[in-house]
Image (cartoon, grey):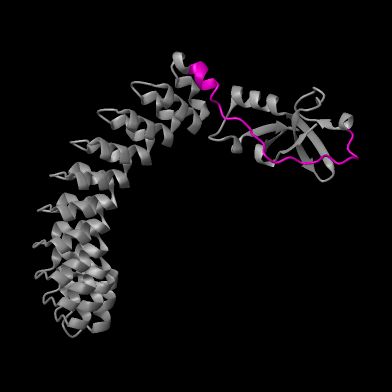
Amino acid sequence: MDIEEFKNLSTEQQTPEICLAAIQQDRRALEYVKEQTPELCLAAVQQHGFALHFVKEQTPEICLAAIQNDAHSLIYVKEQTPEICLAAVQKNGYTIQFVKEQTPEICVIAVQQSAWAIWSVKEQTPEICLAAVQNNGFVLQHIKEQTPEICLAAVKEKPLALQFVKEQTQEICLAAVQKNGCALEHVKEQTPEICLAAVQNNGFVLQLVKEQTLELCMAAIKQNANVRKYVKAEFIEACMNYMPKLEPTEFIELPASVNVAELEDCLTFEPPVKGGIYAFLIEGDRYYLVGSLDSLNEMIRLSFRGSTVDNVFIPIRNCLVPTAELRWARF
């Protein structure tokens, strides 16, 4: 039955079952129910929250049921109560825009549920603003009166929110770059401490540093050696000598049955030299000579990839083997 047919039914013909079926098919049918009952209205809003618009005699129970189905049905509540409004913003913070009498408690709940609901808060308080930026730091751009506490909370949640901080401080900038080095792009006044924290988090932001120092370049390379191309020429040589090195501390004893001359050479074709330190890859009872400590460190110096030598991968037998799997022996 379509809504036009339902409209023309008499009071006697509109049985509870027919009315409910009509409402389930089209919520607008409630408007044409000649004798609305609390039970029928409750069933209607539980199916479609917006059916509240057609309820002639609203009750708190019916309104709450409508809100639970669709928080935006708050717009049709004739007599809002704190309980009804709280239920709406708990379900969808954006419904704060329909709350006629906003209280700090309701506003805090709203921005905790949806940070961007701060747009619709009529009177922003420090508590409300703090709750909003703790949920999403980027809403800082919509905070009318920024405080150091609010700004600090914002950059801790979203470091790149630093771009919206009106009055930057060392503490705020430091907190931002420590969590995301890329926030350095938004630092108005760079200091050595801020830059150092930034490159320690992300070596690649060295390219954003206005005044490079040897200390900053070394810290950046230590974090990621691939940033060498951003190091100023005057620091290149010193930084190259600062490249991380393999420093084995544990050594194995080669079995007496192993003939050094027959070891399968995977990386270098130079025969082992007595007194030298060499890396091996061991698979079962097979020993594969990878190379000398000096040759591997030279390779790392020239083509280091990664943040530490522990995750360097050595090309062996058409595979990449992490240095952590190598075993060391003295000849």
Magenta stretch contains residue 108: no
Q: Position of residue 235 (x, y in %)?
A: 46, 17
Highlighted magenta segment, given as a residue range? 236-259
Q: Position of residue 69 (x, y in %)?
A: 27, 68
Vertical order, 99 against 273 (above or below): below
Residue at the far front: name it.
Answer: 275
Q: Quadrant of the N terminus?
A: bottom left
Query: Which is more toward the observer, 300 or 193?
Result: 193
Query: Which is more toward the observer, 192 or 249?
Result: 249
Query: Which is more toward the observer, 226 or 245?
Result: 245
Say which residue appears at 60% left-offset and 24% top-offset. Answer: 301
Magenta segment, prevailing SS (helix, strand or loop): loop
Give the image quarter of residue 71.
Answer: bottom left
Give the image quarter of residue 127.
Answer: bottom left
Magenta stretch contains residue 257: yes
Vertical order, 105 against 119 (above or below): below
Q: Is residue 2 visible?
A: no
Is residue 293 left or right of 45 when viewed as pictured? right
Vertical order, 209 against 178 (above or below): above
Give the image quarter of residue 256.
Answer: top right
